[in-house]
Image (cartoon, rainbow, N blue to C red):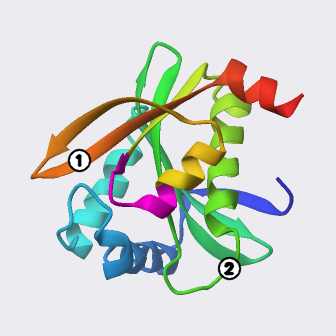
Amino acid sequence: MTNIKLLNFTELSYELTLMVLSWRNHEKVRKYMLSQDEISLKNHLDFIEYLKTTKEKLYFLVEQNDDFIGVIDFYNFKNSSCEFGLYANPEIKLAGIGKILIESSIEYAFDILKLSSLKLEVFADNEKALGLYKSFNFKEYAQKKIDEKTLILMELNNKEKRNEDS
């Protein structure tokens, strides 16, 4: 990916930490999160302190050409696989922002973390995201219900991704 930088949450300035919190609490972002409650500053800062002590989760602010465009995260590491999530900066309009965030996630997972598969969960009614994940060859492998909402579980295998590249 050109001109993309991944900035670890544990190394962000206080100003950038506040910016990320404002994005996460933005209505456009919150409505697609498992926890749709607003997050307090104290809880956000506590979470970042936790990230400094764990290898179970990685969170990054994504920067492109000096613009902060979104967040990607990796968690639930098991058997050379993990789950990931993302959300775009709700304050900017940038064509293809979801595509950039997915490409950044795939590249980091397979090229840096050397994982064999990447998994995600997406609400069934988030048709835009669902279509985007399918365009990257993510395949549905299960569904589950949370609070009357259907979550679709999807996976991309590194071999399938590599075949797409060739």
Residue 28 is situated, as x and y percent measured from the top left of the image, at 37, 78
- In this view, the residue farthest toward the left is 147
- Element at label 1: strand
- Image location (x, y in percent) of residue 147: 9, 52
Which of discs 1 and 2 lies nearer the camera? The answer is 1
Inspect the image, locate mark 1, and give the three-letter code of the amino acid beneath it. Thr
32 versus 53 height, above or below: below
Task: Specify the segment rendered in magenta.
Answer: 122-129
Q: Name the spot of residue 166 as percent of width and height, x first.
A: 90, 28
Residue at the (21%, 66%) spot, across then down: 36
Q: Is residue 5 magenta?
A: no
Q: Relative to residue 108, is residue 19 drawn left or right?
A: left
Q: Which residue is mark 1?
A: 150
Q: Is residue 143 above or below residue 93?
A: above
Residue that badge 2 annotates: 94
Q: Residue at x 42, y 77 (%)?
A: 23
Q: Is residue 125 magenta?
A: yes
Marks 1/2: CA–CA distance: 28 Å
The outermost residue toward the top is 79
In the displayed structure image, the side of residue 28 where residue 150 appears, left or right:
left
Tell which circle, 1 or 2, labels the residue nearer the N-terminal end: 2
Secondary structure at numbered mark 2: loop
- Point out which mark residue 50 bears: none
Q: Nearer the viewer, residue 141 or 32?
A: 141
| 61 to the left or right of 21 | right
